[in-house]
Amino acid sequence: MTQTENLPAYPTLSPAELRHPDSLKWTLYGEDVIPMWIADMDFPVAPAILSALRERLDHGLGYHQLMGDRTLDRLLRAKLDTHGLKNLPEGGIAMLPGVVPGIYATVAALTQPGEKVLTMTPVYHPFHLSITTLGREVSAVALLDGPDGYRIDWEGLEAAAQDSKLMLLCHPHNPTGRVWTHDELERLRDLVVRHDLSVLSDELHADLRFTEGPFESFAAAERVRDRTITVTGPCKAFNTAGLGIGAMIGHDAGLVGRVRAAAGGLMGHEGALSVTMWQAALKDGGPWLADTVAYLRGNRDFLTDYLREHLPAVKFHPVESTYLAWLDLRGCPHAGDIQKFLLEDARVALHDGPTFAPESFKPQTQGFVRLNFATSREILTEALERMRRALDGA
Ligand SMILES: Cc1ncc(COP(=O)(O)O)c(C=O)c1O
C-alpha cells in the first residue's frame, strides 16, 4: 500500500530541505535514516508567522516588553477562555522560556525534597526526570491498555494519591494521544480535591486534536482552579520549538508567583522573536493550523490502516491528539531491543519506549516505540515499508 492519492494539498518539506545543520531531528542519525523520533513536524513555517517575523526583524532586536506583552496577554486570555480558563486574574499568566522549565519550577515550588509526585506512565519523559532530578520521588501509575484505548487505573491512582503532594497531568497525553474526556477530568478533579493535591496540567498539545468540540482544560472547574498550574505554548501546534516560549497559567496569581519565584533569576526571559511568533500564531495562525490538523488526521488514518493490513503484530490505538503514535511491538521478534533493531535494520529512528517511563516501569515499556507521523505522506509510507521489510525478515 504505497498509494498517495486523495491527499489534501499541503506543503511539506523534503529531506534535503529539512537536513539543516541546526536541526537535531534530521542530523542525529545518518543520512540514510528516516528520523521519526523527536516531536518536530516536517512542515514549513506558517505563512502568518513567517511574515510577522520578517516584519519584526526590520525593527531591531532589543528587549521586548519584559513587563508583559499586552498583545500576547490579550490573545492568550481569549484563547484560554475557549478552554474554560475564564476570568484569569492580573498576574494569572507568567511567560516561560519553554514549557519544560515550567514543569521543573512547579515541582520545585510545590513540593519538598523527598516528597512524592503523582503521575501516570508512560509519559513525556521530563515529567519523571523533573521529579527525580529535583530529589522528589515518582509515584507512578501505569495506564491500562483497554480494547478501545488507554484508560486510567482509578484504583491505582487512588492508592498512589494517598501520600502524594502534586499530580503532573499530561492533557492531551504524550505518548498515548489520549484527550481526557469530561468524565475522566471530573473524576481526576474529585481525586485531587479528596487528597488535597496541587496539579500541573501540561496542555501543550491541546490544539492538535482530532476530537470534536472545544478543548476542556483540567482547571476549567472551579473546585480545582486555585490548586492548578496549567502550562502551554505554541511549539507543538505551530512547530516552533526552535523559538522557545511558553506560559504558566493559574487562577491563583499568588500560586503562579510562587512557582515563578522558585526559579529565581534562572528562568531568563523569552525572546522577542518568540513573542512575535506566538502573537502571530494566535492572531492569524488558525487557517494554517486547521490544514495541518487535517493533514495529520490523514496521516494518522493512513498509519492505522497500514498497520492493520501489513503489520498486524504491531498494536496501536489511533490517537485522539498529537502526531505521536505509541506502538506496541512486544509481540514482534527483537522486542527486547526494538528501537535499535528498527534503527539498524529498517533505518528508521524512533523513540524507545522505556524513555517514557520512570526507572521501575522501564521493563513494562520495553517493546514499545513512539513514532512521529508529522511528515509528508511519502516519507511516512517509505518508513512504514522499511519497517515492514525489516519485521517480515526478522
Ligand atoms: C507534553 C509536552 N510538554 C512539553 C514539551 C516541550 O515543551 P518546550 O519545548 O516548550 O519546553 C513537549 C515536547 O514534545 C511535550 O510533548
Image (cartoon, rainbow, N blue to C red):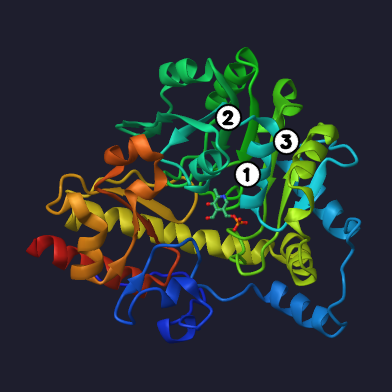
Sooner in the amino-acid sequence: mark 2 or mark 1: 1
Which one is in front in this view, the residue at disc 3 or the one at disc 1? Answer: 1
Q: CA distance from mark 3 to mark 1?
A: 21 Å
Query: Please, what secondary structure does the residue beneath circle 2 have?
Result: strand
- Taking the spot 16% from the left edge, 45% from the top edge, the residue there is 331
Image vertical order of residue 80 relative to residue 208, above or below: above
**Are discs 2 and 3 less than 8 Å apart at CB?**
no
Q: Quadrant of residue 143?
A: top left
Query: What label sits on residue 103 in the rendered view?
Result: 1
Q: Position of residue 20 (x, y in %)?
A: 50, 83
Residue 159: tell me if it is visible: yes
Q: CA distance from mark 2 to mark 1?
A: 11 Å
Q: Residues within 10 Å of mark 1 (few under 14, many from 20)?
A: many
The residue under label 2 is which amino acid type? Answer: Met
Q: Position of residue 10 (x, y in %)?
A: 51, 73
Image vertical order of residue 109 relative to residue 286, above or below: above
Q: Quadrant of residue 188?
A: top right
- Taking the spot 32% from the left edge, 41% from the top edge, the residue there is 362
Query: Please, what secondary structure does the residue beneath circle 3 have?
Result: loop
Sooner in the amino-acid sequence: mark 3 or mark 1: 3
Q: Which residue is mark 2?
A: 167
Q: Which residue is mark 3?
A: 84
Query: What label sits on residue 30 in the rendered view?
Result: none
